[in-house]
Image (cartoon, rainbow, N blue to C red):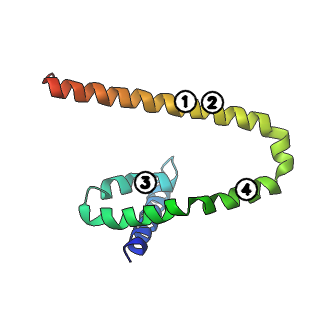
Amino acid sequence: MNGVRGLALLLLLQAVGEGLTRAFALPFPGPVVGMVLLLVALRWPLLRAPVAAAADFLLAHLSLLFVPVGVGVVTHLDVVSEYGLRLLAVIVVSTWIGMAVTAWVLRAFLRREGAKERGDG
C-alpha cells in the first residue's frame, strides 16, 4: 500500500509541476518543476517511506521501461541510420559534460565540508 501511495505522490507532484509550468509560462518542463517539489517534499519523513517504496518498485522493474524506447528505435531505423553518428556524438559529449559537472559540484561540496570541519566557514 505504501508503494501505491508513493506512486500517487510522484504523479501528483509531476502534475503540480506541469500545472505551475503552464500557469506561469516557465521556460522548463513541468516534470523538472515536479522533481524540485519532490526534493522539497522529501524533507518530511512521513513522505519518505511511500516514495522509497515506489522507487524500489520502479527500480526493480526498470528494464520494462526500456521496451518502448527499443520499439521506437526499431520503428524509426531510417532516422537512426541517417542521424546515428550525430546522435552518438551528442550522447557521448553530453555524458562527458554531465560527468564533469557532477565531479565539479562534488568537489565544491567536499571543499565546503572540509572548511566546516576545520572551522573556516
Considering every residue shown, the one lying at the far bottom of the view is: 1
**SS assignment at label 2:** helix
Residue placed most toward the observer, 71 or 16 = 71
Q: Are marks 2 and 1 in contact (CB under 8 Å)?
A: yes
Tell me residue 114's x, y (percent): 23, 25
Q: Which circle marks residue 93 in the picture?
A: 2
Q: Are marks 4 and 1 in contact (CB under 8 Å)?
A: no
Upstream in sequence: badge 4 or badge 1:
4
Instruction: Indicate the quadrant where residue 96 lies.
Output: top right
Residue receiving disc 1: 97
Q: Residues within 10 Å of mark 3 (few under 14, many from 20)?
A: some
**SS assignment at label 4:** helix
Query: Closer to the camera: disc 4 or disc 2?
Result: 4
Q: Amino acid at mark 4?
A: Gly
Q: Quadrant of the C terminus?
A: top left
Instruction: Determine if residue 121 is in view.
Output: no
Residue receiving disc 4: 70
Residue receiving disc 3: 35
Q: Residues within 10 Å of mark 2 (few under 14, many from 20)?
A: few
Instruction: Indicate the quadrant where residue 103 lies.
Output: top left
Q: Are marks 3 and 4 in contact (CB under 8 Å)?
A: no
Q: Are marks 2 and 3 in contact (CB under 8 Å)?
A: no
Q: Residues within 10 Å of mark 4 (few under 14, many from 20)?
A: few
Q: Amino acid at mark 1?
A: Ile
Disc 4 versus disc 2: distance between alpha carbons? 22 Å
Query: Closer to the camera: disc 3 or disc 4?
Result: 4
Q: Which circle marks residue 52 in the picture?
A: none
Q: Are marks 1 and 3 in contact (CB under 8 Å)?
A: no
Which residue appears at 39% of the width and 51% of the height?
36
Considering every residue shown, the one lying at the far front of the view is: 60
Which residue appears at 46% of the width and 62% of the height?
14
